[in-house]
Each structure stands twice: as structure tokens, then as C-alpha cells.
Amino acid sequence: MSQIILGIDCCTRWTNLGLAVDGVILSEMNLNIGRQQASKLPELVEHMLTMQNIVLEDISAVALTVGPGYFTGVRVGIAYGCALAKGLEIPVIPLSTLEVMAYSASKFGITAVPLVWAGRGGVYAAAYCGEGDGLQKELIHPSFFEIDDIRGEISRLYNEQDNNVCCLCDDVKRIAELFSETPEYPLVHCIVSGGILAYLGTQYKAREVSPEQVRPLYLRDPDFGTFQKNIKNK
């Protein structure tokens, strides 16, 4: 019986969906719909499945990004993905936004540093290199970084990896503005590919958990929470 993986990512302004059958990408949708994610997600999933003559009951597992990213988007994706998996009685394969972004470069032997805009003058970042068989080796653990700190980490990797480093940014304009001067390594626009997400779900099948076990990867407190704490401290 074929293994059909549905990929769901809502961690940024983009909504990214994908289907992989037995490790082969069958279909993907990558749409910049911003705040319409919650209302449009069920409709988009149904449309993509219909286009491939697949019904919900055919799905074997849901590959789901759990963050980091925008708080609302992370919650929307997890809520829908886990509810769908629970209703179908299938597992969830949790993946970080950063490792899915990185695969676009690491699969070609490039050291990939995914950067996601995080506000507060910082970014969510990690670093990966390809290990073959569709897997990646983590070089920098996913974290929230002030820009000067991540610049130091990237420069170290740039020297260690013979300049074979590429930064993959969900928002190149805003992230580039954080750098006081143009870096020696490229900053390239990149979003999560729904197809790659579904494909990686097949590669990381060992991560399968029940929907109830899925937890968001926020990496820092939300801005509104910090604002409320500051008010209380005055």
C-alpha cells in the first residue's frame, strides 16, 4: 500500500502544502495568503487532494512544520494539522521550519543557514549540511539570535566550509536591513516548499508521534506577552 504524506506549513505569511507518495513529490501549493490561513486552509487541502484524485482517508501521515515562525501561523498550522490527523487516526511527523527551508540548498552540498524574521532586531536561525539519503546534519541548533550573534556564527561557518555557505531568508529585505554592512555570503529568498516538506516526511518517518504529542517550536516569548510583563513591572 502506498505511503501518502500530506505536508502542511503555515509558519510564515506563506501557506505551503504538498503531497508525496512513496517518497516522490506528487503535488504542491505555495501561496502568500497572509492572515487568511485559518479560513482558507481546509479548502486548499481539499483542492490539492481533488486534483490528484486522492481522498483524505488515503493519507498515511501529516508532515507538519511546528515553528519557528509567526505565532499565529504556527498555531493555525498545528491546530488544523493535528485535528486532521486525529480525525483520520494517523500520525504526525513534526519538522522545524528551518530544516525544511535548508533542504533546498543542503541537498546540493551547500551549507545552508535558514533565517526567519523574528522581530526585535533578530532572527530564528539554524545551520545544516546534507548527509545523503535525503537527510541533514544539524550544525547550529534552531534558536533565536540577535543579528550580531548569528553573523558571528555564519562567519565561522563560512571560513570552516570553504566559503560554501548560503543564507536562506523568508524576508530578504527586512533581514538584509539588519546587517550593518553587506555580508560576504549570499542572502537568498526562500520559503518552505510544500513538496519538500511532504518528501521530508517520508525521510523522517521515525519521528512519527500522535497528534496529542505535537508541541510548537516558538523559541521565544510572543511580543504581546513581553509587553504585558513590562506593564506589570512598571
Image (cartoon, rainbow, N blue to C red):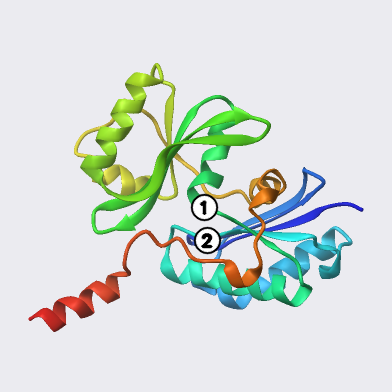
Left-right relation of 136 to 92:
left
Say if residue 37 shows up in the picture: no
Left-right relation of 32 to 28:
left
Q: Residue furthest top?
A: 162
Q: Residues within 10 Å of mark 2 (few under 14, many from 20)?
A: many
Identify the residue position indicated by label 2 in the image.
Answer: 66
From the top left corner, tell me how far across and down residue 121 is, in percent. 24, 53
Q: Quadrant of residue 70?
A: bottom left
Which residue appears at 15% of the width and 76% of the height? 230
Q: Residue furthest right?
A: 1
Whole-number angstrom distance, CA of label 1 to CA of label 2: 6 Å
From the top left corner, tell me how far across and down residue 183 is, in percent. 28, 30
Which residue appears at 33% of the width and 62% of the height? 220
Identify the residue position indicated by label 1 in the image.
Answer: 96
> Residue flagged by tag 2: what amino acid is it?
Val
Tag 1 and tag 2, C-beta contact below 8 Å? yes
> Residue flagged by tag 1: what amino acid is it?
Ser
